[in-house]
Image (cartoon, helix red, strand yellow):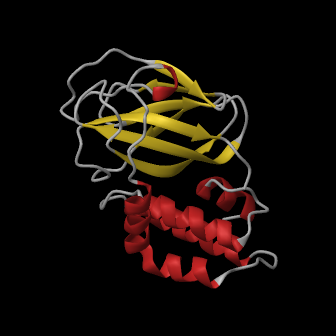
Amino acid sequence: MTPEEAASVLGVPLTATADDVDRVYTWRVGSLGPGDTARREALTQARAVLLRGPSRQRTGAIVAWSLGGVLGVMALLAVVAVVTTSVFGLGPGGAAAPQRSGEPAPLNSSAYDGVSVQYAGDGWSFILTSPRDCPAAKVVVGFADASGQDTIDQLTDTAPLQAGIAYTYTAPDGASVHQYAHIDEIVCHAM
């Protein structure tokens, strides 16, 4: 795998620091399902290629957090689980999603930081389309017990968005005990 391919697989710029590579790697691996070994191996290989590259700075905090693996991700999720004033389906409040059982719901569409968000019609999946490259866009998913209800807890994740290419983002299983999900925020920024 070339460094360019590795950066694409991991969703980071080729110039990302070791800290950024580790942070995105930890997020991506933490959001994988238990049977997604091929994706886990691809992410691990991409991380190794990028960390072997030109001199990259590393901090002890990121190294320790990376070694914490899933426990580190779970701790971070606990920190970001805050109540917001976002309302389902109302402008910046996000696109409401139905129960995980597949109960149909109307497709809602909205935009955050220029990124178009549309409910994909299945579970906690959303279609994200950005007008510009966002290799590690911050995605904040809100969860609630009913459509139209304020956010009860949140998940902060990243998504590798490419200009003009639709990306299907799915919140990981087990991210919340609540049945409904929506996008609270997307921030498209360079690392």
Residue 164 on image: x %, y %: 67, 28
86 to the left or right of 43: left
- Drawn side of residue 7 relative to residue 65, left or right: right
> Residue 146: x percent and y percent?
23, 29
Q: Residue furthest top?
A: 106
Left or right of 66, for residue 141: left
Res 97 → quadrant: top left
Vertical arrangement, residue 178 with respect to residue 85, above or below = below
The answer to which of 116 and 11 lies nearer the viewer is 116
What residue is at 67 percent from the left and 38 percent from the top?
A: 162
Q: Nearer the viewer, residue 181 or 27?
A: 181
Who is closer to the viewer here, 185 or 50?
185
Q: Relative to 178, say whether 1 is above or below.
A: below
Q: Image point 71% across, 46% down: which residue? A: 189
Quadrant of residue 15 within the rendered picture: bottom right
| Quadrant where the image shows the N terminus | bottom right
Q: Position of residue 98 (x, y in %)?
A: 27, 27
Instruction: Work out which quarter of the rendered image holds the C terminus and state it.
Output: bottom right
Q: Identify the residue at image location x=53%, y=70%.
A: 44
Q: Please say if 79 is above or below 159.
A: below
